[in-house]
Amino acid sequence: MIETAVFKVMDTACFLWHHMDDAHIIYDVRSGHSQALNDFAYEIFEILADKPCSLAGLTVELEKILEQPLGDELKSQVKKTIIDFDKMGLIEPKNPEHRE
Amino acid sequence: MNPDLSTIKRRLSGSGLFMTVGPICTKISIKFPSIRDEFMHIYKGYSFSEQPEITDYYLDVYAKSFYRRYVRPQVALNTLTRNNFVPLPESMGLLSVEMGMNWQVAFGCKTHVLFHAGVVERDGIGVVIPAISGSGKSTLSAGLAYDGWRFLSDEFGMLDVDTGLLYPYPRPVSLKNESIAVMKDWVGDPEPFSREYEGTPKGTICYLRPPVPSLENMHKPVRPRVVIHPVFNPNAKPSITPLTKTMAFFRLVRSSANYGDIGEAAFHALTKVAEETISCEITYSSLEEAIALVNQFIDENIS
């Protein structure tokens, strides 16, 4: 279902950011967890925070930013990042049944 | 000013004596004379009072029954929040006292971000030494303390989230096994040491009182400037590996006992520490080597 689900950031007010030279640190006020995102993951999060998006929609947005088509490796990296964000509780499907 | 010795002993054996170490005041009573004597020796020079304004913690060291007081005497602890600690024989009573105080700070302190770390200071440069057990954190902190540095802590680094300053909590250093002989040799005077407690779950333990100037300055905070993660390896060549700010941040989070409890303020405080300090990992095989590496890293990176 990951291919068809539309994901949204749960609540941007739940997250605090600190940007360092080599990473973006996110703090989740609900859980007290901190995690580091690289530039690529941060960009994906920003797109989703801007508006809910499907995997295909994300690919289009990233291609616009990078000004070139995404290769297979990057596409699978985007998919993995979405799955990780979902597990971390940073994003959720707009329709919860799409998680299954 | 401290009460006179007879008042200290009377309060310690009876209704309780208040001991202030850095920002924390603990009311302590010890019903065993032998443990009182050991406590008085290792806490010589600390600040005691009969009635402070605020008391943070409470520690009653007692026997659960008349039998356990005199026949195979056993030490029980009551901290007001917990009284079911595993009892120890009277001969290990000082370990109970230390464990009771550590437990209360580790689980009760929400006023400061706690690091499981040693903290020392020289020329206004606060150095945090976070580490896992066995890395040589205590030996390095104590070694620096008896090499002219000010000792702030062996076990708990205490960071004030509002000011970003580290507050001293200079309790006696808990030395274990091989590090006991190393530090006895390093200090060269048996007086600040406790006797050795053999057969504990961590092997042999011995306590070392911090130097007098560190106790005299136990209310003077310092700004953290350097974070050093020690790694003891008897076969290693000495080395210094710098850490990125992000690595430094996550290592601080890992070493903190109450980061999640304090929450947002702790996140801001630790990112600030990571940004404003320089961090490295040092690998060493002897105390002399570790101290040389610490001095080298600071001299090369802090003007």
Image (cartoon, rainbow, N blue to C red):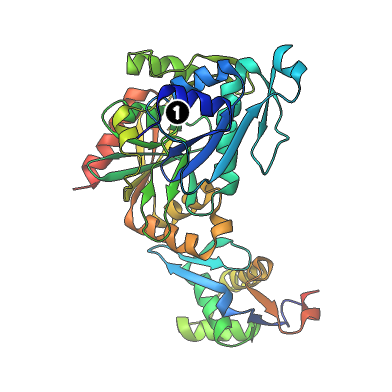
Identify which residue, A23 or B82, lies in the foreground.
B82
Q: Residue B228: give x, y in percent of width and height.
A: 38, 41
Name the amino acid, label 1: Val
* Residue B37 seen in this snapshot: yes
Identify which residue, B177 or B12, lies in the foreground.
B12
State which chain disc 1 sits on.
B
User: In the image, what residue occupies the spot 28% across and 33% down?
Assistant: B149
User: In the image, what residue occupies the spot 55% across and 37% down?
Assistant: B102
Q: Is residue B290 left or right of residue B25?
A: left
User: Which secondary structure, mark 1?
Assistant: strand
Q: Quarter of the image holding residue B204?
A: top right
Identify which residue, B251 or A39, lies in the foreground.
B251
Above or below B80: residue B42: above
Q: Is residue B245 left or right of residue A11?
A: left
Q: Quarter of the image holding residue B88?
A: top right
Q: Residue B26: give x, y in percent of width and height.
A: 52, 39
Identify which residue, B267 or A49, lies in the foreground.
B267
User: In the image, what residue occupies the spot 70% across and 33% down?
Assistant: B85
Q: Quarter of the image holding residue A34?
A: bottom right
In what quadrant of the picture does the C terminus of chain A appear?
A: bottom right
Q: Which residue is mark 1?
A: B173
Above or below B49: residue B259: below
